[in-house]
Amino acid sequence: MTKRKASLPIFIGIAVAIGVLIGSTFNYKNKSVLFSSNTNEAKIKKLINYIQYDYVDKVDTDSLLDDAITNMLTKLDPHSVYIPKEELKRVTESMQGKFVGIGVSFIMHEDSVVVTSVIKGGPSEKAGLEAGDRIIIADKDTLFGQGIIHKANLTDKEIGTILGSRKISDAVMKSLKGESETTVNISIYRRSTGKVLEIPITRGEVSIKSVSSYYMINKTVGFIKIDRFARTTYNEFKQGLDALISKGMKSIILDLRGNPGGFMDIAESIVDEFLEDDKLIVFTKNKTGKLTKSYATSKGDFEDGKVYVLIDQNSASASEIVAGALQDNDKGIIVGRRSFGKGLVQQEMDLGDGSAVRLTTSRYYTPTGRSIQKPYIKNDTKKYNNDYIERIHNGELINKDSIKVDEHLKYTTPKGKVVYGGGGIIPDVFVPIDTTNNYSAKFYRGLNDFVFKYVDTHRKELSTWKLDDFVNNFDKDNKVFNQYIAQLDLNAPILPKTSESLKRYLNALIARDLFEETGYYTITHEKDNMILKVLELEKSTN
């Protein structure tokens, strides 16, 4: 489905929430003016030269310049950011939805690289790698013990820290990634056979999912979870939508909780599946006041179905475009808590050395004309980023009446619904944050490690389970759960409700290893208050 734009000529920048993009370069008509030498440019060059050649101590001028750019952008707005070259490739891969590598997920366990999953259709699956394999050598790089610690350049203080884990992960990926069609020769230890195997793997393109799960919750209600709006997201979403429609879906739950945003045009394409032809989706306005409007096109595949959109305080940018477009067009029901409130549009601009800036170039507005950008003070990102803490203190996470609205920013939808601008999307149906579960660290801190060891030890028998059977029958006798409880240092019995929640989470983590994210959500959704609210709404309207 193609997009039709109604433009009063303006280029459109990119929608990025807490890190996303929708274009790469501007098409300036007069680059000689924009990029010509001037007094300010000469001043910066002279200062850098003075520091580099005349300052009393040796200084890393590259780092100094990076800091200067970062500080300069903080004086503009919270979303104009500098991306160093070492970070840009990682961010770009995530948003393009693909990278070149061997196609495995892994963790570090007891100083070894352990494959936790093999990406379907990827190079490793074709070469015969399996979950549970230990990668010990990649070409001439040793990836275990002191070898990986030296390769990652870890200090003694970094070992066992989050920073240390990040550096080890980067070092492993550096060994496994490379140019497409090149070969990496790896040695693996296969625990199931006790043998070391030499396996050559030809690197290739590997997909990064942005739609992590879709499945039927019941006979008529389908569920799709979108983690971010990457370049591949619409195609992933459409695949899920078509599959669920073929299974009889009449109502869809679109889960955008925790989704930081992404490409604006991808969000528009997804909205287009739900809105009738010529309905306004979103419009942007730049500094000169020029507009770009995006409209729904030919008949979408779910225009006649019921739509529920789940949002929370971490749903931002492109997520808010989707929620705002559907809410303002009286299509579907927005369920959850007030969204992040990010209504600025960025364009990514290359700085020529592998780094880039994402500069705010316009604002976007929902179909009724509201901006949902929350207030900010230039050069004060701390308060802006601590907004979640303020929401906790003012009580809005547990009570909709605590959400502050500006009556001057009141808008009305075509069917008379009152909506507000100025600080995120306020849901039609409020669901408070769950405060009933006791998520004490003492119960959960060892859970991931226990699940890994259990799955790693029982892979053969676990491989025989089917998802529905697993959900209904796994660990009926609590044998696995009791194994975990036995290793906790508890001074008193666990309360029944805590025990129930803990076991559900344990089973969900095991299900994730076996059936990916769909396994996890199938179990957790049984007590997910937003999902339960949707099912309650469904029941009341049918």
Image (tube, rainbow, N blue to C red):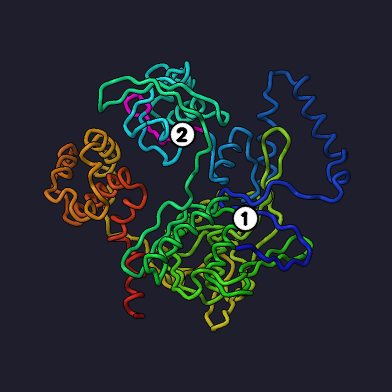
Circle 1 residue = 15
Q: Residue at x 87, y 38 (%)?
A: 37
In this rendering, position of residue 537 left or right of residue 279: left
If you read the primary sequence from the N terminus, does the residue marked by circle 2 or circle 1 appear first? 1
Disc 2 marks a residue whose amino acid type is: Pro
**Residue nearer the viewer, 208 or 490:** 208
Q: Residue at x 37, y 19 (%)?
A: 145
Determine the secondary structure under disc 1: strand
Q: Residue at x 32, y 25 (%)?
A: 110
Q: Quadrant of the N terminus?
A: bottom right
The answer, for residue 491, to whether it is visible in the render is no
Q: What residue range appears in magenta? A: 101-113
Q: Residue at x 69, y 18 (%)?
A: 57
Circle 2 residue = 123
**Residue nearer the viewer, 275 or 143:** 275
Comparing labels 2 and 1, the label whose residue is closer to the camera: 2
Horizontal and vertical percent position of residue 445: 29, 40
Disc 1 marks a residue whose amino acid type is: Ala
Callout 2 touching callout 1 (CB < 8 Å): no
Above or below, comparing residue 328 to residue 363 in the picture: below
Tell me the distance, in whole angstroms, between the alpha carbons under discs 2 and 1: 33 Å
Above or below, comparing residue 505 to residue 409 in the picture: above
Magenta stretch mostly in which secondary structure? Answer: strand
The answer, for residue 509, to whether it is visible in the render is yes
Most extreme residue toward the left, as rendered? 477
